[in-house]
Image: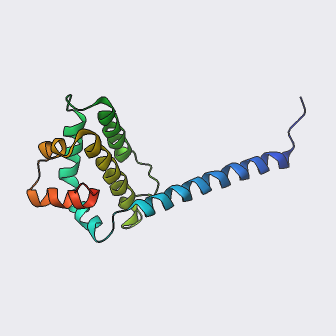
């Protein structure tokens, strides 16, 4: 075996770090494109406790398709992870990525399981559900 040159290791390391940075920037750009329009992110922050209960209720409903429950379980795990695409200590943007991913997942769940299933598990107010529908584009 030939010994690896010192400069070769640094080149590989720099390429790996550069690639990870490019992938991260692409993911952040995708979130920026997929974000809900208007002032709905502030609505979503007020809905957070009801939204977490909704996710738990939907994820434990055995009548929903397995793929839906798996998606919801992955979303709950992502929300619980301390590592995010955009760190939570960054004001506004830190929680925006969580809300955008949750909104996209709920939109997918509503398409697969039906809007009635989401309504059935909503424990918040009707106004809160209307705000959730605006944030996720369910209507």
Q: Is residue 124 above or below residue 71?
A: below
Q: Is residue 8 above or below residue 137?
A: above
Is 132 in front, or is 73? 132
For the point 34% across and 44% down, the residue is 80
Is 63 in front, or is 75? 63
Residue 92 location, x and y as percent?
36, 67
Q: Is residue 90 left or right of residue 125?
A: right
Q: Which of the image's four quarters has the C terminus?
A: bottom left
Q: Is residue 5 left or right of residue 111?
A: right
Q: Which of the image's four quarters has the N terminus?
A: top right
For the point 35% across and 59% down, the residue is 95
Is 52 in front, or is 83? 52
Q: Is residue 47 left or right of residue 100?
A: left
Residue 30 location, x and y as percent?
48, 58
Using the rendered view, name the quadrant where residue 74 is placed. Answer: top left
Residue 51 location, x and y as percent?
22, 50
């Amino acid at each position: 075996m030939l010994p690896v040159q010192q400069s070769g290791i640094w080149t590989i390391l720099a390429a790996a770090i550069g690639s990870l940075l490019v992938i991260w920037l692409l993911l952040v750009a995708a979130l920026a494109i997929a974000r809900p329009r208007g002032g709905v992110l502030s609505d979503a922050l007020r809905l957070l406790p009801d939204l977490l209960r909704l996710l738990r209720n939907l994820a434990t409903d055995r009548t929903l398709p397995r793929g839906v429950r798996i998606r919801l379980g992955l979303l709950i795990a992502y929300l619980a992870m301390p590592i995010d695409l955009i760190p939570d200590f960054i004001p506004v943007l830190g929680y925006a990525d969580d809300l955008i991913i949750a909104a996209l997942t709920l939109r997918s769940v509503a398409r697969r399981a039906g809007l009635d299933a989401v309504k059935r598990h909503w424990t918040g107010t009707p106004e809160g559900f209307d705000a959730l529908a605006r944030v996720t584009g369910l209507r």
